[in-house]
Image (spheres, helix red, strand yellow):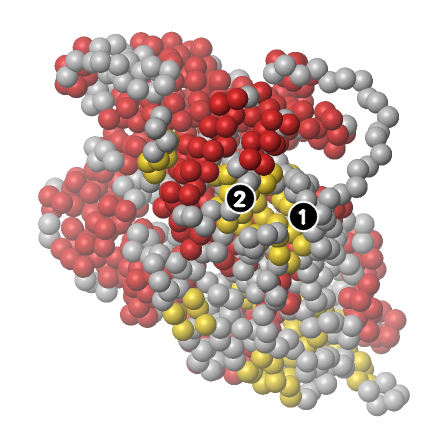
Amino acid sequence: MNNKTKLAVAAAVTLLALGTAVILGINGKKDEAPPPAAAAAAAPLDTGKILAGMQEVLAGYRKIIVLFADEKTLAAGEKAMANQVGQGLFHENRQRVAELETQMAALVASGSPQRFDALAGLLDYIESDKSLFDADRLAFRELLRSLQAAVAADSSLPAIKLHKRIGEDLDALLEIERNYEKEIRLVFGRFEPRAIELKRERWEDYVASLKKLYARAQILKDFGVVMPYAVPKAPARKAKGEEEGEVFGYSLPPKTIVLTFDDGPHGVYTSEIAAILKQYGAPGIFFQVGSNLGTVAADGKTKLGPRAEVSRKLLEAGHTLANHSMTHAQLSKLNGQGLKSEVLGTDDLLKAVDARRSPLFRFPYGARNDEGLDVLSAAHLRSVMWNIDSLDWADPVPSSIVERVLRTVDKEGRGIILFHDIHERTVKALPAILDRLVAEGYQFAGWDGNGFSAAKGNAAVATPVAANPGYSDSWAIVIGIDDYASWPKLQYAVRDARAIRETLIQRFGFSADHVLSLENREATRAGILGAFHDKLAHSGMKKNDRLFVFFAGHGATRQLSSGRDLGYIIPADSDPNKLATDAVPMTELQNIAESLTAKHVLFVMDACYSGLGLTRGAGPGNFLRDNARRLGRQMLTAGGADQLVADGGPNGHSVFTWTLLQALAGKADLNGDGLITATELAAYVAPAVASVSRQTPAFGSLPGSEGGDFVFALPADAEFLSAQTSQLSGEAIALNSKLDASRQPAPTPVVVPTAGNESPVVLAASTTVVVKDLQGGEQKIVTPLAVPSSARQLAQRANDRGLQLYKEKQYAEAEVQFTEALKLRPDFALAANNLGFVYFKQDKFKEAARWFENTVKIDPSRAIAYLNLGDAHAKAGDTEKAQKAFRNYLELAPTGPGAAHAKQQLGKA
């Protein structure tokens, strides 16, 4: 989309000129108005109030950022005041957002002919106002989601177009978030342009600009706080036991964590957090705001609202319900009956939800006074504070939340973590935090009625989600040599190396500047060793990172006087007569592997040689948890001594690298859990390559390895199949058929349904494969047990397998997989479209049309589904329906890749 240049003032003037069908008060309720039809035609549109509210939300959002921009430099007192004031700003913004959601929903429902133009003007402001930075736009994400849901209820064409535009804006906001999470290392040129044009400003520049608008001291002063001059630090008080007074978490056992969540229950995020906690076997304590649960009448009678059901499900799942006041007021400023009603009203509502509510209470903002503590004592409630603050209510970047929590946990060694179950960013940050805590041996404690305790074996039941293999960062060294000075020249090695680099970056999210590439004359002996010893050593690699090393070129084997073989990789400048001095021996790579700080290292060598003793492959167990604790140093080679690398693979690749690329595309996910381990990679690649060539790939762990297994997490494929989707060449399909024929059938995971709406459990499966070690002997390797998956994850994996099969023109098999995806997730628009297109490719046009119609019902803004629907109707002979579908496509994507085709089809009618 073109970048728009409207200023906020210009947007406001435009919106004022449009007229409104409803006049909204500050509380979001409609004033008395004439009948809808008459109002839509006669009343002036005024969305200026909505725009002003959005600007207030932005101002509050910016102030929170300024408050915590230099968090590490703040004194303890100033940090406490910043926390208190920031939370006040945050809750004011929550109220503003709720009012704006009500106003926007009323505007959508008004029936005014100009309503979508008015809403488009608001989107103009969010997308392109010159006063906004990229990060500013994250302040409007919840508003956009609510507006998208409201617009989705309208099936008119303007509503569908607006729905599509909002979806593109939300996609752009996701890119903005990633921009700051990955520190400006993502390249956006490969993404489709969106209405919000990304400017890629640095977060530091953004914060510096905000500091010109706001000062922390002024923000604090506006909220009645002036920080005193620093005074000498008082002696640290003795920590009380958990059975005495207020609970802070200081006296918990070492490596014990209590997970707490404030401000809910939320209609969506609370349940998502509960699902994550279930995957890790971790209990949570949910401090709930009474007004979210229901109301208490003047006579003391309680009336529960819809969200009380969320609380009941938390209790049923083994979590704890606790009190967080009635309205989230600052209780230190209240007294008398007002203070008591804040405490006791919520306690009555929690008892109405279930008598098993806990006696735990948390003061909003942590602001309490003696009278408040006395009220708790009289009501037999206990105050629970915290010693680890995630600041998830203020920090919009999930990775920053993760880093803050883990840093503080490392310092404290135990404690109570403060989260909030009302933010998507908390949902995103939580798995990474729990992954690391599990890996470092922490246990999670819950409330047992008297205190906090961890169930026996608590730390051993964690099962992280498949999408997160638990690495902090990813690195790679990729080497390809065709142009040798003294050895025979090769034709495929550089192409192989480039394909591997592209796969690491585009498919697995490796940062481009973390992938070191050496080609031809760059790959001298000094250059290769320098990449490890100099470039990589000074790159900032951490102990929780992974390193992938790929070499494509010549290999050689030399027999030592002891009779033992020693393998070498051949640099570009190596002399065949000076192998011992010019080449890189495997012993050197072994030394390098042992010196690296990364947790897991995998060497993949598209060269043939022998002569390195390796240990066994990884075995079964509670895979991700155990794997996170163990170092891994592994190697997979293309063949043994005296074997030639076969270079007759498709697209100019060697057979080994082509097989490796297919494995990384998903074929090596032998147990279907969305993860590919090095062991699975070898279990697929080694037998497959051996079956179609004279090579016998070898695999094993280098000495010094502790049994850790390198892990790739497969990304979810989001491609909607269409006529533009590319498929493999005949040569590639033929080779893939041979490769697949060589592999033994993978064990099928058993899906066990669970009660209610809980995700099914997938029973783990593993398999044993015999491969060569680098000494030429045989070894049995056992693939890891599958990680349990949710129904959503299983549906995505089935869809991804269907896409692979479609590209290999195995339509019947692809149909089975897309059908499976829809069984697991009936609202999966992607799988619905893809199933329809497989029917289309099999000339089942009426069936295809039904699935394309299902797709647009699930996702009415998906343009490609309308194009597919038009083609299906045309093939089925229903010209009228085909024309309607093509017109809808052109309305949604007038310059899309199928526009010329749609116009041509309309011209035939």
Task: State the image quarter where residue 840 is shown.
Answer: bottom left
**Label 2: element kind:** loop
- Rendered position, 765 above or below 847: below
* Image location of residue 53, percent across then percent down: 43, 18
Q: Is residue 90 left or right of residue 44?
A: right
Amino acid beneath label 1: Glu
> Which label belongs to residue 341?
none
Q: Earlier in the sequence, mark 1 or mark 2?
A: 1
Q: Is residue 892 left or right of residue 590?
A: left
> Which label belongs to residue 359?
2
Residue at 41% across, 35% down: 292
Instruction: Point out the residue furthest to the front here.
Output: 378
> Which label belongs to residue 242?
1
Residue at 81% across, 54% down: 537
Disc 1 to disc 2, C-alpha distance: 14 Å
Viewer-side residue, 881 vs 474: 474
Residue 687 seen in this snapshot: yes
